[in-house]
Every structure is written in structure tokens, then in C-alpha cells.
Image (spheres, rainbow, N blue to C red):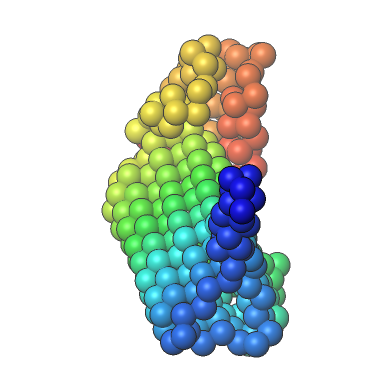
């Protein structure tokens, strides 16, 4: 066999290994569960009947994936995670609701995520490229965006929306129906009972706005002029003694040509139903 044939054979073997589905002998996988090419199911894992797991996703040892749960491609799910178990809601009575998880997420040890409830729309959705550190929790009817981080033991109650690139520190508790804006940063051990503005750093018990998430803005490549606009708006919205409605009016007067980020911030504030964290 010539060198070209050897290279082709090696390439074929490599592709075969990458696309082979591996299930440890001790794992319990329901015959109707759908496993994508290259998926790996670890020791003593349990995969339920209505579960779909994407290509090259790895499910670690002692994990339980049940309910009507769909997991995307190239996720890493570590030891003891429980995904798709019944919502912790007394109004739930076994309805067929779902948990949908995107691609390339890292779900660390003993993370828990619940599907939706009928009263909340029937679906919990997690985006892609997120990091859920050990013992963090996503409750029923939550919508979590892309590139979100939940640090150790952070807990989202039901019906919470977390926008893209938000970071939630360790041991943070977030109240039901709260919205967390894009690129927001919540410091550890905070109690969050009101909406967290986009681009803000909040911390405390209850959480208060301390300023902008400058590091997050830098990492996202936000330009200097945009940050200057946001800084001026933050001083008026969150650090003045104006009512929120009057603060919004003043920002609109002082900054009549807002950048896209400032426009989204103002929209977020106007649409708040629980009120917005302030200084």
C-alpha cells in the first residue's frame, strides 16, 4: 500500500473514531433516546426516553438526563449533573414541557436544570457557549442567552431572562421574573430582586449598581465613544436622585443621538416591570 493510500486509511479511521457513539457498559440509555455521532456517555449515566443529545457531546459519569430534553453539539457535561428533571413548581402536574440546551456549553459538576411549565410557556432555553460552574441551578421557564457564566452555586429562580455575555457570581440568588441585561456582571453573594441593567456591575444584598462592567465591555471590543455615552447615561439613570422616568427623559435630552448600546439600555429600562437596580 502506497503512502497516499496509508494517509487515506488513517484519515478514515480518525473520522470513524470521531463519529462513533460511545456508551459506557454501566450507563443506562433508553432505546428511544437519540444520540448524535461522536456522543460519549460515561459510567453510570442515565439517559431517558425523550432525550436527544447532539454530536460530540460528552456526558460524564453519574449524570441524569431525563424528560423532554434536547442538548446541542460539543457540550461537556460533568459528573453528577441532572438535566431535565421535573420543575420545582407546585403548579406543575406532569405536562409535556421541554428543556433545550444549545451548543458548546460546559456544564460542570452537579449542575441542575429544569424544563418549563405550562404557565410559563412550556420551555426552558439555554443558549450556546455558556459556562455553568458546579452546583449552579437554572429553574423552569428561564431563558439564558449565549456566552453566559453562572459561577458556583448561583441559582436562577423561575421565569428569569439572562441576556448574552452576562456573568453571575458565586452564591448569587436571583428572584423569579427578574431580567438580567446583556454584559451585566453580578458580584458574588448578591441578592437580586430587580432587573439588572445591561452593561452594569451590581453587587449587594439587595444588589445595587456600582458602575459599568468595563472589563466586559473591553473584552467585547466596545469602542471608546460608546463607552463614554454609556458612562454619561449611567450617571443620570443610576446615580442621580431623579425618578427613573425623569432620568430616562434627561438622557434622551442630553444624548439625542444614542448609539445602539445606549438605545438598548433605554429600551430595557422602559420595559422593566419589577423596577431596575440603582445605586
**At 49% from the left edge and 13% from the top edge, which residue is drawn?**
224
In front of the other: 51 or 143: 51
Image position, residue 273 (x, y; %) = 60, 50
Image position, residue 126 (x, y; %) = 58, 58
In the image: residue 62, left or right of residue 260: left
In front of the other: 252 or 185: 185
User: Does the rendering let one see residue 26?
Assistant: yes
The number of numbered badges drawn on the structure is 0
In front of the other: 176 or 77: 77
User: Does the rendering let one see residue 68?
Assistant: no
In the image: residue 259, left or right of residue 158: right
Image position, residue 73 (x, y; %) = 60, 58
In the image: residue 43, left or right of residue 115: left
In the current view of this chain or complex, which residue is farthest to the front?
A: 1
Q: Which quadrant does the C terminus fall into?
A: top left
Image position, residue 66 (x, y; %) = 56, 80
**At 51% from the left edge and 87% from the top edge, which residue is drawn?**
28
In front of the other: 169 or 160: 169
Amino acid at each position: 500500500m502506497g503512502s497516499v493510500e496509508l494517509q487515506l486509511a488513517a484519515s478514515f479511521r480518525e473520522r470513524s473514531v470521531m463519529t462513533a457513539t460511545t456508551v459506557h457498559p454501566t450507563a443506562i440509555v433508553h432505546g428511544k433516546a437519540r444520540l448524535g455521532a461522536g456522543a460519549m456517555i460515561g459510567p453510570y449515566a442515565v439517559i431517558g426516553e425523550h432525550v436527544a443529545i447532539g454530536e460530540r457531546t460528552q456526558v460524564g459519569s453519574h449524570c441524569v438526563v431525563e424528560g423532554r430534553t434536547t442538548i446541542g453539539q460539543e457540550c461537556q457535561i460533568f459528573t453528577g449533573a441532572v438535566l431535565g428533571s421535573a420543575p420545582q413548581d407546585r403548579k406543575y402536574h406532569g405536562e409535556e414541557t421541554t428543556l433545550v440546551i444549545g451548543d458548546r456549553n460546559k456544564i460542570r459538576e452537579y449542575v441542575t436544570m429544569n424544563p418549563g411549565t405550562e404557565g410559563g410557556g412550556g420551555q426552558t432555553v439555554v443558549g450556546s457557549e455558556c459556562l455553568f460552574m458546579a452546583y449552579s441551578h437554572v429553574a423552569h421557564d428561564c431563558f439564558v442567552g449565549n456566552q453566559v457564566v453562572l459561577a458556583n452555586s448561583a441559582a436562577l429562580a423561575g421565569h428569569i431572562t439572562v441576556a448574552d455575555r452576562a456573568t453571575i457570581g458565586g452564591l448569587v440568588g436571583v428572584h423569579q421574573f427578574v431580567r438580567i441585561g446583556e454584559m451585566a456582571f453580578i458580584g458574588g453573594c448578591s441578592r437580586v430582586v430587580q432587573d439588572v441593567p445591561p452593561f452594569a456591575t451590581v453587587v449587594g444584598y439587595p444588589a445595587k449598581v456600582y458602575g459599568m462592567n468595563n472589563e466586559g465591555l473591553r473584552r467585547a471590543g466596545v469602542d471608546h465613544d460608546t463607552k463614554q455615552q454609556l458612562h454619561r447615561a449611567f450617571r443620570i439613570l443610576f446615580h442621580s436622585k431623579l425618578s427613573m422616568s425623569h432620568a430616562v427623559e434627561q438622557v434622551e435630552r442630553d444624548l439625542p443621538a444614542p448609539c445602539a448600546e445606549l438605545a438598548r439600555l433605554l429600551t430595557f429600562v422602559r420595559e422593566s416591570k419589577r423596577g431596575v437596580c440603582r445605586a
